[in-house]
Image: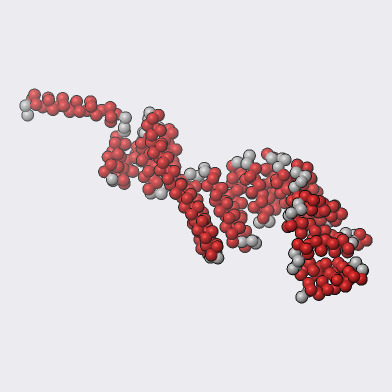
Amino acid sequence: MNQKIRLGLVAAAAMLVMQCGPALAGKSMELRSANTYFNQGDMKQALEWYEKADQKESKEAQVYARLVELYAEQKRWKEMSAAFAKLDQCADKESDRKKYKSEASEIIDKLWMGLWNGSLEQTRQADAKLAEGDSAAVRDHYDQARARIVTALEILPDRVDFSKRMGDLYITEFNALYADAAGFPLLEKAAQVYDKLAAAYPDSVDYAVTLSQLTYNVRDYQATRAAVDRALLRHPEHAELLTFAAKSRIQLGLAMKNDKDEISPEGKALMGEAVVYLDKAIAKNPNDAMLVYNQALLYRDMGDAKRALATFAKVEGLAPDRNDLLFDSWYSMAVLYFQDLPEAEQDAMKAAQYFEKCLNLQPENKGLMFNLGVSLIRTGIRDNMSRGKALMEKGGE
């Protein structure tokens, strides 16, 4: 080859290197190779080279944006999340980091939003099947709704709203299909979710209250007591927490009975603590009918019939439109007057008055008819006894 021609080719090659050098200088050999395969559509080779760039810690933002994309396609969520986290550690210009992080974020956002919306759609379909009475299909749709949230949590494990939705899905399914202990496993799973939420966010009173309610509803009163006592350290004046502190102690105390059905000293001590907690709650919310009703129940369960009667009597003034509370309060008062007061203080007439009030709310309740009839007979008044016999006969049909 002519020496001048050869020198000319060398010079041209050198010029080409000088022109391409700045563009190539910012990219590692691994990234250049990976991009070549990526652009050719050979994703297997591209992934291998992007991973080599990661192993060499090239700290190039494009490497991790591409890894996010490729791992997402393969549903390798942990690796995808790890690659996304490394974007903040890259050594590129800030503008490049923002660009590639934005691309990766868009990929992840599409993933979790699709899963979230899919979970909502499965819940909607569960509601439709519930209206049709297809319980098996309802359960299947809830399973699918939760499966999508499980995947979403694998993608973004720190998203609190995902975790909360998981717990709420268990609660919603229970409310839709169950009203008894058969559905307790669902509430127990919800409690496990909220236990983690309450531990991670101890300042959130809502998580603590929900956890307390769930454990109480499945009758795990020790767990309720432990959860609510932890929460009260941060929220010592919260009425609902104080109420659950009391209610859990009531149940634990009632469970401590001997062979004669007498509450043990330890049980009585727990119920004494319950009184203190409810007193605190009512002091904060004196017009809360439910708190007053719970206090009346506590006195009744403690065997303090007189204080129970006085407290039940307050409910009507606090909640005149709450037929559920009125019925339960009046019925409890009737029973207290009928049999729970000392024998010399029992009052059949007052028992009859409160059974009558209950019957006005539930006029077809045969059990109430019978009880009212017995109370009227016990008054010893002729007219009452005549009516009482008729009510007993009707109630006993």
Task: Give the residue displayed 40% in from the left and 40% down from the top.
Answer: 104
Residue 195 appears left or right of 282: left
Tell me how the rendering is colored.
Answer: secondary structure
Q: Give residue 383's quadrant in the image.
A: bottom right
Up-down relation of residue 33 to residue 348 (above or below): above
Residue 106 coordinates in the image, percent (x, y)? 41, 41
Work out whether residue 255 can be spotted: no
- For the image, the number of numbered tags is 0
Q: Give residue 61's quadrant in the image.
A: top left
Task: Give the residue displayed 49% in from the left and 56% down from the top.
Answer: 122
View extreme (left): residue: 2
Residue 326 appears left or right of 84: right
Task: Give the residue displayed 28% in from the left and 38% down from the top.
Answer: 33
Residue 29 coordinates in the image, percent (x, y)? 29, 34
Q: Give residue 182's quadrant in the image.
A: bottom right
User: In which quadrant is the C terminus drawn?
Assistant: bottom right
Work out whether residue 68 can be spotted: yes
| Closer to the camera in the image, 260 or 386 | 386
Up-down relation of residue 219 to residue 60 (above or below): below
Task: Give the residue displayed 43% in from the left and 43% down from the top.
Answer: 108
| Closer to the camera in the image, 148 or 258 | 148
Residue 60 coordinates in the image, percent (x, y)? 36, 34
| Closer to the camera in the image, 295 or 366 | 366
User: In which quadrant is the N terminus drawn?
Assistant: top left
Residue 389 coordinates in the image, percent (x, y)? 85, 73
| Closer to the camera in the image, 374 or 180 | 374
Up-down relation of residue 156 to residue 322 (above or below): above
